[in-house]
Structures are given as C-alpha cells and as structure tokens.
Image (spheres, rainbow, N blue to C red):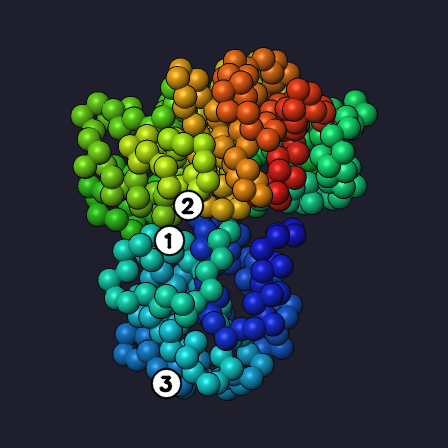
Amino acid sequence: MYRKIEEDLKEWQQDFKMPLMLIGARQTGKTYILDNFCKNNYSNYLYINLDKEEDIKNIFENTIDPESIIEKIEILKNIDINIDNTIIFLDEIQTSERAITSLKYFCESDKPYKIVCAGSLLGVKINRFKSSFPVGKVIIKYLYPLDFEEYLMALNETKLIKEIEKHYKSNEPMIDSIHEKALDLYKKYLILGGMPAVINNFIQNGCNISHVNFEIQDQIITSYLADMNKYTVNSESIKNSKIYNSIPKELARVNNTFKYSIVDKDARQIRYESSLDWLLASNMLLKCDLTTKNESPLKAYVNSSKFKLYLSDVGLLRALSNLDYREILLDKNEMYKGVLTENYIACELYPKNKELYFYNFNKYEIDFLINIMGDIIPIEVKSGRRTTSKSLNEYIKKYHPKYSIRISTKNFGIERNIKSVPLYAVFCLKKEL
C-alpha cells in the first residue's frame, strides 16, 4: 500500500545526518512504513522496540553517547553493527525520554549513523518533554490516515486519479458515468476512512463494503481510549475520553464551534484545556480556528476562544457516532452526512499546513478559508447537490475574492467565478495550498 510519506523517506535517505522521527496517531501505519523502508533500502537493518526491550531501553538511562550505546547494544544482542551500512529503527521511542535526547548526539557525531524512530503519542511526549528536546537535530515528519488519493491508489484507481486531476485543472465536467463512479468511491471512503487496517480489510473482501469488518474501527477507538489511560493520570484520562467521545455531538450542532459544556455540563476551560492539548498533540483531533480577518496571514487573526474540533479520521467519526454505513450509501441521513463531509474536508486539508480556519461575518459563516498563492479563498462545503448558499453569496458580494470554491457532489465547472469541486477531488485542491 503506497503512502506519500515514502517520498519524504527517500529524500531523507540522500542526506541522513539528522535522525528522522515519524509522528502520528496509533495505527496510522508508522511502524509498517518505516519497517518496509528499512528492509527495502539497507543491507543491514536493526529493529528495536523500546516498549518491549527493557534491556535496550536501560542503556539509554545510563548513557546517551552514541558509541557507547552501539557498543552495549552489540553486547546485549551478540551482534556486530557496521554503522556504514546499517539503519537502526527505534520504535515506541516515546517510552524513553533519554533515547529521544540521545538523537541530538547521534546527529552531532562524525560517524554515519542512520537512525529512524516512531512511536504513538510522540507529539504529546514532545509537548511535555522535561529535558531539552533536540530541536534542530531531528527531522520530524507527520503521518496521517490515508487521504482520498492514497485510498484510490490502494484500489489501483490510478487512471481515475489522472482523470480527476485533468478535469480539476480544466473545470470541464467529467462524463456522468465516471463522475458517479468517483462519487460512489467517495461515499465508501466516508464509511471506511483512511486507517490502513480498515482499507486492507475492504480490499481483502473484494471491495465489498457489506463484507467489511467494522469492528476494526471500534478496536482502534478502544486502543485510543486505552492510550489515554496508559499515558496519563486517571483524572486526565477521564477528561480526555470525555472530550473525544463528545465530538459527534459537538459537530451535530447547528453552531458547531466547540463548547466545553457539551463535554460535561460542569466543564470549564481551565479544567479541560490540558486534556484538549493532549488530544491535539496526539493527532487524534484536528483543530479549526476562527479567524477574525480574511487577510494573510490568517493565523495572525485567530480568535483563540472559538474553534471547531474534528476527528483525525472520518471513518472513526462514523464509527464513534454509531451511524450505520447503509445510511450513507443510500443517502438516508443527509443531516449527519453533512457532519461527516465537513470532517472529511478537514482531514484532507489539515495535513498540508497543520492548520485550518473558518470565518464569521454578520450572521454568516464560511466553512473554510485557505491561502492559495497569497489569495484568501473562501470554501463552501455541501454534502449533496443542493448548492444554494447565502453565506457564500454574501461573502462574494462583500469581499470580492479572486474566486471562490464550492465543494459538493456536483460535477466540475465554474460559474459566476465559483469553482465547483466534486467531493472526490479535494486532494487536487490540497496540492495548491
């Protein structure tokens, strides 16, 4: 299963001086990707799981000198490590703060050490690092669930990808049969999401959605909740899980900006803020900030008290909401399908710049604002074919953007300077950011 992050790994391979750290939520494929990369590109490969190999973890507690670390690993494993042609993969590195600190010294050594590492909740570990994190000595890359383009690649739909890209550029409608095929695949992605284990199960079952084992999604959610218990004190884990479980209810509201009172009627920001930070740093949640000005840079005008939260995977949102997959396929629940659609757009756009923005003016709201080549472009999101939008029309009338984007199930096209982007083509928009 191809992942775009592989291109980043190949680039790192050309200049490996800095250790590479892959950050992402649990079960997004970090270990699988790095393991395959190491096996396929190096003649000698040493895999170490610091969560399971306490004896190796203990080495870092006693020394962070690279030569000494390698020497003691050789003794414990009774092996010779030729650092000229060996890559070392430190998995679950978040369990050892000293191992993370040692990366600085591997980077500064004159010897050609090749170190990659990964671990669940690494983002949380970095945010709460008690020692001095090796800033500038580590290359950090982020891994998210498969986006829609990677999902199409996994299904070997490369011809469809090229056709979508062609029509995105030309704004010419695709023929109806291909458009409907792409929409059908999009609906299935709303159900499946982008977690590798779920996509694999879909493929193994002949791409028959009715044969998918949706318990996999439930198990992933359970593992997320277990992490909250394992890596936090009890009081914080309870607050973490309350916030996480509240997201379907938060997003279902007409005004779906995050409210602590939805989490718990007695909740207050001061009590829950650290838990929210934990969930954001873990990449389990994505944040969309309200910007008070539609000017560049959008980040400079953020109203920090108003924001929306999305789950990092749209399939997990469907599972957490207990929404039957047939309701999506048969368009039976248009209201909640809109919630999933908005979350899907957030998942597609967020990884590019690690930020999302929405905008309010008068009584109107623009779902997303993005910066394309210095121009602030408004995005209106619709889950179906009905694309009438007073908010977007009023925005255009008031601010006269260079152009606007409407994302819906409608075919490609451009009318009144509004670019129509089908829901399955958001990956093309992402490439413009």
Secondary element type, mark 1: helix
First in sequence: mark 3 vs mark 1: 3
Q: Give the residue displayed 61% in from the left and 43% down from the top.
A: 432
The crowding category of the residue bearing disc 3, from other C-alpha atoms within 10 Å (few below 14, some 14 to 19, many at least 20), is some
The quarter of the picture where residue 128 lies is: bottom left
Q: Give the residue displayed 61% in from the left and 52% down from the top.
A: 3
Is residue 63 found left or right of 150 in the rendered image?
A: left
Q: Which residue is mark 2?
A: 283
Q: Position of residue 384 (x, y in %)?
A: 61, 18
Indicate which disc residue 68 carries.
3
In the image, is residue 329 above or below residue 154?
above
Q: Are marks 3 and 2 in contact (CB under 8 Å)?
A: no
First in sequence: mark 3 vs mark 2: 3
Q: Position of residue 45 (x, y in %)?
A: 55, 74
Q: Are marks 3 and 1 in contact (CB under 8 Å)?
A: no
Q: Position of residue 115 (x, y in %)?
A: 48, 72
